[in-house]
Image (cartoon, rainbow, N blue to C red):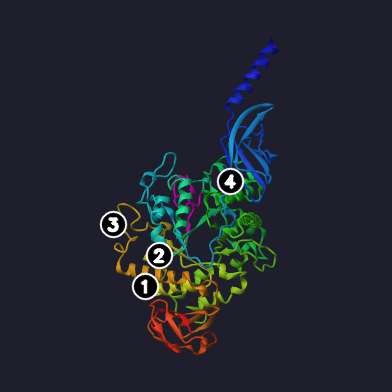
Amino acid sequence: MKYKLLVLFVLAQLSLFSQNVRIDRVEPPSWWAGMENPNLQLMIHGKDISSLEPGIIYPGITVGEITRVENPDYLFVNLTFGKEVVSGSFNIVLKDADKNVASYEYKILEREEGSAERKGFDKTDVVYLIMPDRFANGDPSNDDMPGMLEKADRNNPDGRHGGDIKGISSHLDYIADLGVSAIWMNPLLENNNPEYSYHGYAITDFYNVDARFGTNEDYVNLVKSSHEKGLKVIMDMIFNHASVYNWLIEDLPSEDWIHQFPEYTRSNFRGSAIMDTHASDYDREKFLTGWFDHHMADLNQKNKLFANYLIQNSVWWIEYSGIDGIRIDTQPYSYKEFLTEWSSRVFQEYPEFNVVGEAWQQKESITAYFQKDAPNRDGYNSGIPSVTDFPMYFAMSKAFNERDGWTEGLAQIYYVLAQDFLYAAPEENLIFCDNHDLDRIYSSLGENFSKWKMAMATLMTMRGIPMIYYGTEILMTGNAGDGHGFIRKDFPGGWPDDKTDAFTKEGRSKQQNEAFGFLQNLLEWRKSNGAVHFGELKHFVPADDVYVYFRHKDENCIMVALNNSSNAVRALDTDKFKECLKKFNYAVNVITGETINYIDAFSLPPKSVLVLEFGK
């Protein structure tokens, strides 16, 4: 009798167990037939499922290695796709002995035609950087959403202000009219943190757009609408850190998914330790494993399961959303071997795609180390085609404010360009005068409009891929020293109760319209100028406050001349430039549209820039 009762008790417990087992998540949430890489790692999450046996039956798909980790709530299942796999769905079944105890429907999708051949952003483009929370509030109803910890507070410079995907979508005409050709948005993925989460860099869910910005479908529609306007879209991705409130970090698959210390340990932020042949192990490890901030856990890409998870997440977003490029946040902070593997996998699927890595370094040689095919002594190759050119940024932020000297003033730009031999492809660098972490350029230049025009003309004619931070075209101001909220102010007119609407000509001041028109003119001209896109750059040593450089390709030649003097007119005798000008007999002033038939000499007013396009 006791034996029978025991059997009945065990059967009852198994029945109760089978009723309670549930698969909460499977990531990636879907996949595609016809991918170049035939392997897929599924991460299955559910309470106490690790003891169960997963089963999948689908034509052409075979189940490979099954990995169980420390946390009993996870199963990792590797699948291999045969060439014959087509779109459809199958059930992921979890079994206890021979009994099915949980099931989850998983979809295999069909790739859109031409998906693998998509063309990424390149030297012909100009990128417009948008902070979504601060650009425009197109849907006030999603400012505060159920389950989201931080509520909107537009009076708080560091709080959420309500900008969203709909706000960006509703102003695509404005962006296209300005003349840029690509949009980079700070991260839109879920940042469900108690405070200071508007910037997007503390992700809590790698597969879902933040509900206060919209939905995944809204993002896909934004990409499609942007493409219809001739605008490419660049997605911001972070591999180095994530929020401590990220569900994967709150419920770690294993302890080594993040870098952990007995007490909080911050990164030393010294990227030079990566390639420094004299660097101590201590400094290198602290840079790589230290946390970015208290609320941002440092991710360990040496964990192969997590590395694969992050790589597949990138491929999933490219395929799902239709984006044209990726910007990698804090590139040097991730293990460099991981990024080589990441880039290899991405370009395996999308050979014509493009990626820019944020290499926020002070020196040209250190920045160049992180670019694809760099001539590195240790043989390292990141596979990342483009890097952020911070040395050029530092030069341009100082050049127009300093008196010219051997290394000061315009010589700052000259010496950065003189070190282009360090880069594998300096023309692929992303160049900029400011961004979401830096003083706004108009403030850096003391709100001097003449200096601003010099900076913008240089940016639009320099080698590299130019990037403009939202609001630069209307002379928005802000200093990072006052707090990041002040360099990320709301775009005027983006909220229903704004007193002015700078998205319209009528809502801008006279000087703002002049600035908008100046930049718009340069951007429109740049769209079809092959010399600026692909031409060689030849420059002449700055002298007497004047710096001159040329961009030339075949019969197309432009000259940029900058006078950095605050009070003196400078005469420009073109005889010294005959190696560039001997073919030509007239020029067109790109800024004014004036045709100039006498090109032997020019006069440069104080603090001015001259951009000429030559013809025969």
Of callouts 2 and 3, which one flags the residue occurring earlier in the amino acid sequence? 2
The answer to whether 344 is drawn above or below residue 74 in the figure is below
- Residue under numbered circle 2: 178
Query: How far apart in space, not on screen, are marks 4 and 3 (Cα)?
Result: 48 Å
Of callouts 4 and 3, which one flags the residue occurring earlier in the amino acid sequence? 4
Nearer mark to the viewer, of 2 and 3: 2
- Residue under numbered circle 1: 449
Nearer mark to the viewer, of 4 and 3: 4
Of residues 430 and 71, the one nearer the viewer is: 430
Q: Is residue 197 magenta?
A: yes
Within the image, what quadrant is residue 20 found in? top right
Nearer mark to the viewer, of 2 and 4: 4
Query: How far apart in space, not on screen, are marks 2 and 4 (Cα)?
Result: 36 Å
Magenta residues span 183-202
Query: How far apart in space, not on screen, are marks 3 and 1 (Cα)?
Result: 24 Å
- Residue under numbered circle 3: 499
